[in-house]
Image (cartoon, rainbow, N blue to C red):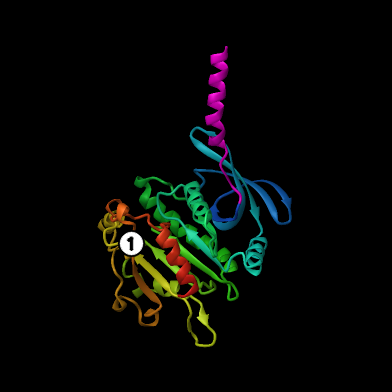
Amino acid sequence: MMQTRFLLVALAAFAIPALAYHYNDYVLTTMKMETRQKIDDYTTQVHFDSNTKGGDKAVFLTNITKIGTNNGIDKFEAYVISPAIVRGRIKAKMFMNMVNHTLLAIHGFNVNFTDHLKECKDVTSGDKKSFYLLPIIWPSDGKLYRYWWDRGHSKKAGEALKECIALLGDKWSCVSLIAHSMGNRVLKYAASEKIHLDNIFMVAADVNADIFLKNAGEEIGSMVDINSSTNKQQGKIHVVYNEKDKALKWSSFINRKRLGKQELKQEKILPKLQGMVVSEKKWDTPDELKKDKEHDHSYQWEKAGIEFYEKKMHNP
């Protein structure tokens, strides 16, 4: 009897953490939600799962909680929040000098959204950061063999995000954006001249290397804010690359040359974007990690990278 009781207690100890996933900050997503109940004029309770596909519009979520698992599919509860509430609370943080910048973060291919949220939470834990980090999640299938399907999902996600990103990135806000890997394809389709961003960080970008000779690159450039006194862009588009990136080597083989695997020369950029689009070689990693990291693709949240974003947001 004692052995049985001990076993049940032990199993419970492992079961509780499995159901205890919770993310209580704001998230912007294009995942389709199932409405459960309207709480008030600004808040609606919703359910979704880890296999949820993309919708036609983006929403802001908060208090994402795992409520169970069915046939290996995780189930979540969350609350859809009015964009005006989110925007107001972010501005309040800036007004009270808690932060001086907002950084939107789009994840890449083969990423479970809970992993992206955990990474974002880890980034802002510990030492105080000068920016507020707002994750953007889109329905990546999270499997390598689903690469081509995710390309389709990323296009739909980008188109759905335009309006909400424009609400955050206006002429009076200090907002920058980082996109990693295929998240740069999401960025490509989200691009709109109605969006105003201080800086864009395209890290390990899984898009064509000649994008800034095309209309798509011009549309991305249109989002970088103009300084009203000089009539010039006050921020930059930082293209961070790693020549030894193994994932982009594979992607270059099945696609064309990838932006995040090589230095971007100014002659490969439209004249109107030259000087605004700058190529940045992947930052150095500590010597003891270099052997493991030199072929890395997912280096966007390394300590040196976070310091790079902070520095450029203050001094583009």
* Position in image of residue 36 (x %, y %): 67, 44
Q: Residue at x 27, y 62 (%)?
A: 243
For residue 270, above or below residue 167? below
Left or right position of 189 against 229: left
- Quadrant of the rendered image containing residue 300: bottom left
* Position in image of residue 241 (x %, y %): 33, 64
* Position in image of residue 58 (x %, y %): 56, 58
Q: Residue at x 58, y 18 (%)?
A: 5
For residue 54, above or below residue 100? above
Left or right position of 128 against 37: left
Q: Report if residue 22 lies within the magenta region.
A: yes
Q: Residue furthest top?
A: 1
Name the one closer to the observer, 291 or 264. 291
Left or right position of 77 against 253: right
Q: Quadrant of the N terminus?
A: top right
Q: Residue furthest right?
A: 40
Count neighbours of disc 1 (C-alpha within 10 A) and say few if under 14, some if 14 to 19, many if 20 or more: few
Question: The magenta stretch spans which residues?
Answer: 1-24
Q: Residue at x 56, y 50 (%)?
A: 32
Q: Quadrant of the C terminus?
A: bottom left
Q: Residue at x 51, y 51 (%)?
A: 117
Instruction: Identify which amino acid the numbered label 1 is placed on.
Output: Asp
- From where the camera sits, is residue 223 visible? no
> Magenta span: helix, strand or loop, mainly?
helix
Would you name the residue on which mark 1 appears?
A: 284
